[in-house]
């Protein structure tokens, strides 16, 4: 996800067969369901880069914004179902009450901490589609199809095609990520867990001006993850390569048959 998003290219892992076929006989955990939404980000950004500038891009822009809305609302519905936002608040309160090593022995607190990391990742995905929405509107110069802002994609959607709403929302999500990551990032955290914070923090830092206090805070957190990020990128590139090889082999078998 991080490779395709930062590279603004569709990932092989966002293909429908990769999202569905490996899970035919196993129920997905909530983290995987969140990542399914995140795997579409590279494709959304690639399509945005290919949009014609000005009014000629309005039709395609409306389609991409609809897909952005689906991602935003999909993550929002998972949050409503599993309630990790409230868990973040509980974890932040508890983390200020005593040493983390005592807290980590409490199974309930460990569950809250896990949900908090899910909330940070979910916020990063929603931030990405809001930032993409801003980029689309600036690229075509107006709301798609001459719509007046604010405009909801549909009656049950929380996503709006209003540049002011999108801009404010992406900043709020970025600040939430920095605040939550500062609470969640602990010396006791292992490589696997800590690297899950790298992508949200990378997304967040791009939203601030350099002098913004949250930008400074975010860059400090990223520097703490620097070694783990390199390890994570190596593993991610390897997984992406393996997935591409399998997809290519599968295509060859289909052609031969």
Image: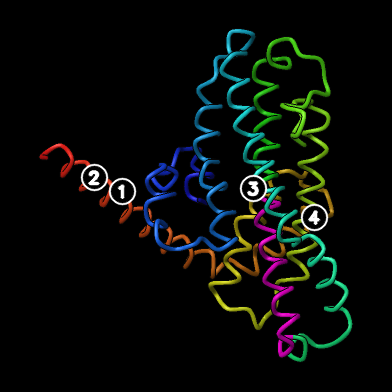
Labels 4 and 2: the sequence-earlier one:
4
Which comes sooner in the sequence, label 3 or label 2? 3
Q: Which of the two labelled residues, at mark 3 and mark 1, occupies the earlier sequence position?
A: 3
Q: CA distance from mark 4 to mark 2?
A: 40 Å
Residue at the (59%, 26%) spot, across then down: 64
Q: Nearer the viewer, residue 138 or 249?
A: 249
Mark 4 or 2: in front is 2
| Circle 4 SS class | helix
Pick the residue in front: 121 or 25: 25
Residue at mark 3 to residue at mark 4: CA–CA distance: 13 Å
Tag 2 residue: 248
Q: Residue at x 70, y 21 (%)?
A: 138
Q: Residue at x 63, y 28 (%)?
A: 66
Compute the Cα span from label 3 to label 1.
23 Å
CA distance for labels 3 and 2: 28 Å
Residue 23: x and y, percent? 42, 57
Magenta highlight on residue 100: no
The quarter of the rendered structure image containing the C terminus is top left
Which residue has dot 4 on it? 176
Residues packed near mark 3 inside 10 Å, few (<14), some (14 to 19) or many (20 plus): many
> Where residue 102 appears, x then y in whole percent?
77, 91
How far is the residue under mark 2 from the one under mark 1? 6 Å
Which span is picked out in magenta? 104-125
Q: Nearer the viewer, residue 216 or 128?
A: 128
Q: Name the residue tied to disc 3.
A: 125
Element marked by disc 3? helix
How is this picture coloured? rainbow
Helix, strand or loop: magenta stretch: helix
Asked if marks 3 and 1 touch (Cβ < 8 Å), the reply is no
Q: Tell me: 5 left or right of 166.
A: left
């Amino acid at each position: 996800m991080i490779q395709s998003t930062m590279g603004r290219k569709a990932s092989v892992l966002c293909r429908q067969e990769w999202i569905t076929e490996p899970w035919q006989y196993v129920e997905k955990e909530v983290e995987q369901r969140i990542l399914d939404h995140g795997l579409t980000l590279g494709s959304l950004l690639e399509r945005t880069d290919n949009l014609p500038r000005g009014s000629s891009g309005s039709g395609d822009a409306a389609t991409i914004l609809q897909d952005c809305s689906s991602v935003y609302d999909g993550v929002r519905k998972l949050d409503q179902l599993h309630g990790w936002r409230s868990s973040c608040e509980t974890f932040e309160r508890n983390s200020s009450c005593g040493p983390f090593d005592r807290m980590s022995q409490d199974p309930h607190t460990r569950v809250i901490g896990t949900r908090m990391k899910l909330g940070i990742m979910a916020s990063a995905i929603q931030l990405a589609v809001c930032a993409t929405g801003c980029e689309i509107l600036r690229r075509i110069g107006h709301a798609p199809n001459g719509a007046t802002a604010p405009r909801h994609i549909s009656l049950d959607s929380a996503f709006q095609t209003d540049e002011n709403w999108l801009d404010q929302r992406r900043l709020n999500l970025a600040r939430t990520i920095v605040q939550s990551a500062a609470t969640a990032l602990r010396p006791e955290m292992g490589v696997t867990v800590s690297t899950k914070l790298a992508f949200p923090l990378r997304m967040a830092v791009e939203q601030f001006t350099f002098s913004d206090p949250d930008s400074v805070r975010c860059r400090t957190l990223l520097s703490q993850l620097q070694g783990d990020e390199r390890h994570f990128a190596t593993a991610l590139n390897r997984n992406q390569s393996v997935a591409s090889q399998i997809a290519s082999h599968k295509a060859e078998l289909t052609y031969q048959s």
